[in-house]
């Protein structure tokens, strides 16, 4: 049965990565699905290769928090498509807006943090497999009616090292890079500095950690950490440190430890952030547990010590993240929490 006979398309339910997502019915398996298509008439070969690579990477990253892909192919008209699980629910971005507008239907802060942790688990798994997402944002996290959390839109994903458990994709057959040096890809409000500068070779797991930190900032405050409507404004905004989440919005509830974690992830220098989502996950859990216990979640020196499981690193070594702020930071950065009254404060380039 060809694709046109197998899938019955209904209304448009989303757009992303250059494709259009339809609510559809899989006649062969008699179930509802989401059908994403990229029309040949409105796309280049490079865009179609990227689209197919998106489907293949998502399909190969089998994880409870990554959208399952059921089918992929090309229609007789040359359109490329893939079929994935249809999720009824909302995005993390919609839940964030509901919560910070006072809606009782948002599930509260704990519900938002649980959803965020689901996304963090998905990205930690991808990093462990050698894949970086590069377009993480609240709109790319779906929350189903039964609480399932799924990270979607892997169209900009690419390997950052030899992938473990991920096979070849259309990207390999294409024989060339899908992102050129100097090309800026991603979503402005959640984009790491190295990504905004088009430094393709430097965009690795730490860039995803920046985006996750920006998402966590939005969960806690209802705002993105750096305001910018253009790339030039964003590059200028990197010269200033965002306000602590606990000070960004009057009356915001920020569990102890999350101020430090969030700003550590939003450091301008990638080497100053948690190195990957797996480490961030451990820091997140530590901060969350400390918050539930009413503790600060850091040592007296302000340093997070995170033990890495032996099977998570080829070296099998454990290491501690650097203190935040770094010990060699300029004195004006070592101010107390009470000094962070404005929306933004200076930070080193």
Image: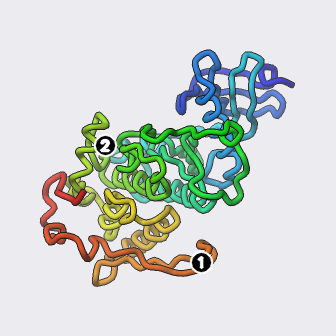
Taking the spot 59% from the left edge, 38% from the top edge, the residue there is 88
Q: Which residue has dot 1 on it?
A: 315
Q: Is residue 69 left or right of residue 348?
A: right
Q: Is residue 197 above or below residue 314?
A: above
Q: Is residue 19 above or below residue 122?
A: above
Q: What is the C-alpha distance between the residues marked 1 and 2? A: 47 Å
Q: Is residue 185 left or right of residue 60?
A: left
The answer to whether marks 1 and 2 mark residues whose Cβ atoms lie closer than 8 Å is: no
Taking the spot 44% from the left edge, 51% from the top edge, the residue there is 107
| Rendered location of residue 188, percent (x, y) | 37, 40
Res. 349 image quadrant: bottom left
| Rendered location of residue 297, percent (x, y) | 36, 76
Res. 342 image quadrant: bottom left
Taking the spot 59% from the left edge, 77% from the top edge, the residue there is 315
Q: Quadrant of the N terminus?
A: top right
Q: Nearer the viewer, residue 203 or 340?
A: 203
Q: Nearer the viewer, residue 24 or 196?
A: 196
Coloring applied to the structure: rainbow
Indicate which disc, 1 or 2, sits on the residue closer to the N terminus: 2
Instruction: Residue 91: tell me if it is visible.
Output: yes
Q: Which numbered marker is on residue 101?
A: 2
Taking the spot 49% from the left edge, 66% from the top edge, the residue there is 281
Q: Which numbered marker is on residue 339?
A: none
For mark 1, give the secondary structure. loop
| Rendered location of residue 324, percent (x, y) | 30, 71
Residue most toward the right? 1
Q: Is residue 294 above or below residue 93?
A: below
Residue density around tag 1, few if under 14, some if 14–19, many if 20 or more, within 10 Å = few
For mark 2, give the secondary structure. loop
| Rendered location of residue 11, percent (x, y) | 60, 21
Give the mark toward the camera: 1 or 2: 1
């Amino acid at each position: 049965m060809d694709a046109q006979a197998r899938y019955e398309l209904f209304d448009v339910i989303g757009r992303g990565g250059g494709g259009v997502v339809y609510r559809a019915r899989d006649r062969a398996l008699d179930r509802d699905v989401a059908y994403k298509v990229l029309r040949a008439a409105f796309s280049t070969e490079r865009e179609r290769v990227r689209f197919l690579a998106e489907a293949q990477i998502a399909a190969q990253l089998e994880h409870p928090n990554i959208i399952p892909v059921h089918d992929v192919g090309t229609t007789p008209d040359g359109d490329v498509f893939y079929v994935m699980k249809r999720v009824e629910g909302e995005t993390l971005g919609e839940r964030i807006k509901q919560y910070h507008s006072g809606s009782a239907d948002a599930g509260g802060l704990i519900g938002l943090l649980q959803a965020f942790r689901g996304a963090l688990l998905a990205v930690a798994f991808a990093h462990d497999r050698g894949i970086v997402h590069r377009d993480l944002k609240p709109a790319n996290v779906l929350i189903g009616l039964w609480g399932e959390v799924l990270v979607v839109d892997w169209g900009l994903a690419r390997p950052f090292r030899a992938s473990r458990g991920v096979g070849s994709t259309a990207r390999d057959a294409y024989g060339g890079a899908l992102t050129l040096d100097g090309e800026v890809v991603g979503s402005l409000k959640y984009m790491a500095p190295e990504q905004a500068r088009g430094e393709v070779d430097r965009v690795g797991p730490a860039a995803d950690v920046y985006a996750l930190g920006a998402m966590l900032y939005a969960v806690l405050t209802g705002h993105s950490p750096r305001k910018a409507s253009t790339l030039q404004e964003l590059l200028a905004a990197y010269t200033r440190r965002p306000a602590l989440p606990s000070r960004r919005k009057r009356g915001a509830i920020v569990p102890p430890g999350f101020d430090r974690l969030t700003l550590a992830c939003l450091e301008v220098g990638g080497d100053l952030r948690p190195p990957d989502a797996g480490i961030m996950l451990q820091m997140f859990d530590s901060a969350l547990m400390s918050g539930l216990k009413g503790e600060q979640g850091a040592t007296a020196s302000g340093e997070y010590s995170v033990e890495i499981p032996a099977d998570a690193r080829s070296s099998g070594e454990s290491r501690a993240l650097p203190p935040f702020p770094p010990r060699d930071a300029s004195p004006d950065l070592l101010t107390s929490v009470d000094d962070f009254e404005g929306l933004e404060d200076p930070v080193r380039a």
